[in-house]
Amino acid sequence: MLKFLLPGVVLALASTHAAAFSYAVQLDVPEAYRALLRDNLELERWRDNPRMDAAQLERLVARTRGDVATLMQTEGFYSPAIEVSLERGGAEPTVRVRLEPGAPVRVTSVKLNFRGAIASAPAGEQPTAEALRERWPLKAGEVFRQDAWEGAKRATLRALLIERYPGARIVSSRATVDPATLRADLELVLDSGPPYRFGRTEIHGLERYPARIVENLNPIEPGEPYRQSALFALQTRLQNSGYFDNVTVEAPTAGAAPAAVPVVVTLVDAKRRRLGLGAGVSSDTGARGQIEYQDNNIAQRGLRLLAGLKVDRTGPTASVTLSWPIRADGARDSIGASLTNTDLQGEQTRTFALDAKRARIDGKIERSFGLQYQRQSDQVAGLPTANNQALVPYYGWTLRDVDSLLAPQRGYVLNLQLGAAAEHLLSDRSFARGYGKWTGFFPLAQRSTLILRAEAGAVLAGGRDGIPSSYLFRAGGDQSVRGYAYQSLGVAEADAVVGGRLLGVASAEAVHWLTPSWGAALFYDVGDAADTLQSFSAKRGYGVGARWRSPVGPVNLDLAYGRDTGKYRIHFSLGFAF
């Protein structure tokens, strides 16, 4: 057995000996280029490598000057002063690299030439050769960097590929650098090829749903100029429609006539029927359970039925909605009915509602208008039951301009609502209602965000009587004024708190992320709901919180102090209320 063990022992000793060889690298270079050398020099990569030895180190040192020169050329420095020395006097060898970059080479001239159809394209057909010359990123006078040169070429070619000219190519490119005069002369020749136009749309994989669902969502008309943005818009619309599990939209140009490139839509249908169960908890409404049934193809016409039942601490809500497929103009029509029983702050309410709505999403803006009828029965202990009804035409407008809908760090969301009712038109009282909410996200530092929120509403009427409570306002809770119970700020009536005609809430919150997933927050909320300006009394709440970036949005756990009650409350919520 000894003859098999000895080679292993020898190898282990050799490996240990090799691993013991180490050396230091001292970079005496400007800070701006320290990371470039540290991350790319072979001298740095071989440190602590078990195969390194003194002879290998000397070979690396001999190559280092050339390596540094090559790396500095990528940053525009073609005549740097470089010194590389190997010092052996210390505990371990030290390689010292000294660098003086000198003056950079700058772009002196740019010649951007075009061939193909774009060279004679009319001024109104974008992109034009002149527009691409004006948008050329690497202009005369700028430092010539290799990455910038390659990026400028890619950006100019991409501008052709995505708009009208998917067959465009670079014919030639040349950068003539003169280190002696610190000049760089650039020349690029691109051939746009012919302009392409869309042809007919081909649909593949559609089995469960009518073709008009795709046709209504398709903004591309035959004969339109080729645009990658149009293909992306169609794919996004189909993916967001809810009818398909997978969507691919392509316009293959290989072998296609430039005047009629087919638009190929490949689909995987979503299941027609779905039954969903859900559960959750929040400090506002307690534990909740939910069941939903969805059918995506009622009457074989793509009509979508959604029926659900939700139960939480405030009471049950049953609802049913019938939605039509999105129209060719991007609008979606729906009708719905709901029945709700709530017991909130001493007020028991039974509400039956009918709603007809048309909604449209255009980029970052969502618009909706509709007609809602509500019939409501309100009971406050010690007072007669109030039966109210209202027929309300309404309009809603929402702008979402944030970097992420799931966990925003920058941007803002603005929501506005308007509605009105007229007495004797299925309404017990005439009133007009307006509401607005703004939430802004502002980066404070590398890992901190300031969240500001403002909310206001008003019901213009001679009084509250005759107005269903869902059109009035309350405040307090996780997404309102923390430190106060859910919907506990409003108008005191007998032993209950009911809605008022005025609402005003403001909030400021600073979040600092201690790790990529965990953060801490400080917040200050102020607001109230009242019936008149004279009775409006802003309530204040403030405290600290913990934040967790979960896969479904930020989880918020807050400890808030209600200044006007002198009590602490714990608030738990998920996500942002947009």
Image (cartoon, rainbow, N blue to C red):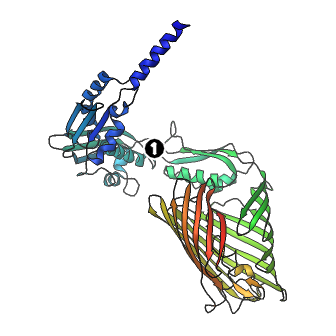
Q: Which residue is drawn at 27% across and 25% down?
A: 58
Would you place residue 128 above or below residue 576 in this image?
above
Q: Residue at x 26, y 39 (%)?
A: 73
Q: In the picture provided, is 163 more to the left or to the right than 306? A: left
Would you place residue 2 above or below residue 529 in this image?
above
Would you place residue 123 above or below residue 525 in this image?
above
Q: In which quarter of the image is residue 47?
A: top left
The one of 224 and 293 positioned closer to us in this rendering: 293
Can residue 421 be spotted in the picture? no
x%, y% of residue 368? 64, 70
Q: In the picture provided, is 548 more to the left or to the right than 445? A: right
The one of 478 and 226 positioned closer to us in this rendering: 478
x%, y% of residue 224? 51, 52
Q: Residue at x 69, y 75 (%)?
A: 485
Would you place residue 243 above or below residue 400 in this image?
above
Which residue is most to the left?
180
Q: Residue at x 67, y 81 (%)?
A: 489
- Mark 1 burial class by Cα count in 10 Å: few <14, some 14-19, many 20+: many
Q: How many tags in the picture?
A: 1
The one of 437 and 550 positioned closer to us in this rendering: 550
x%, y% of residue 520? 55, 62
Can residue 60 be spotted in the picture? yes
Q: Mark 1 points at which residue?
A: 166
Q: In which quarter of the image is the C terminus?
A: bottom right
